[in-house]
Image (cartoon, helix red, strand yellow):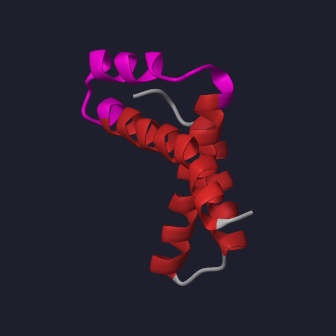
């Protein structure tokens, strides 16, 4: 695949990832209306999933680079936090 074709195919995924990042930021600051508007901007579940996967991959890569841990260790730590979220008492 040529670079222009690759960029063309990747552009919608990047746009979805940017919406996912915006959605996360809106939720973090308590902006329910902004989060709802961003959720409504996705073109179905697959669009949301592709964007979320790209955000997750990039976030784990940033964590790996900053922490010096292997990607496998970063994923392991993330899984532990996810498990703890299931057992933690609600705020």
Q: Main secondary structure of the magenta part?
A: helix
Question: Dividing the image into 4 quarters, which one contains the N terminus?
Answer: bottom right
Furthest residue in direction bottom, as rendered: 68
Residue 27 falls inside the magenta stretch: yes
Of 39 and 76, nearer the camera is 39
Residue 79 falls inside the magenta stretch: no
Horizontally, residue 91 falls left or right of residue 87, namely: left
Of 54 and 63, nearer the camera is 54
Question: Dividing the image into 4 quarters, which one contains the C terminus?
Answer: top left
Please determine whether, in this image, residue 89 is positioned above or below residue 5.
above
Determine the residue positioned at 70% across, 63% down.
76
Determine the residue positioned at 68% across, 65% down.
2
Q: Could you tell me residue 28's position as x and y percent?
A: 32, 36
Determine the residue positioned at 39% across, 24% down.
38
Of 63 and 48, nearer the camera is 48
Please determine whether, in this image, residue 69 is positioned above or below residue 36.
below
Please determine whether, in this image, residue 67 is positioned above or below residue 54.
below
Horizontally, residue 1 falls left or right of residue 65, namely: right
Q: Could you tell me residue 31's position as x and y percent?
A: 26, 24
Marker count (numbered): 0
Q: Which residues are magenta?
A: 26-46
């Amino acid at each position: 695949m040529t670079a222009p074709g690759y960029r063309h195919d990747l552009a919608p995924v990047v746009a979805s990832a940017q919406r996912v990042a915006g959605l996360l930021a809106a939720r973090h600051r308590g902006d329910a209306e902004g989060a709802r508007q961003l959720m409504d901007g996705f073109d179905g579940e697959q669009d949301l999933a592709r964007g979320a996967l790209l955000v997750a991959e990039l976030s784990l890569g940033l964590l790996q680079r900053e922490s010096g841990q292997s990607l496998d260790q970063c994923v392991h730590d993330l899984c532990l936090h996810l498990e703890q979220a299931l057992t933690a008492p609600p705020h």
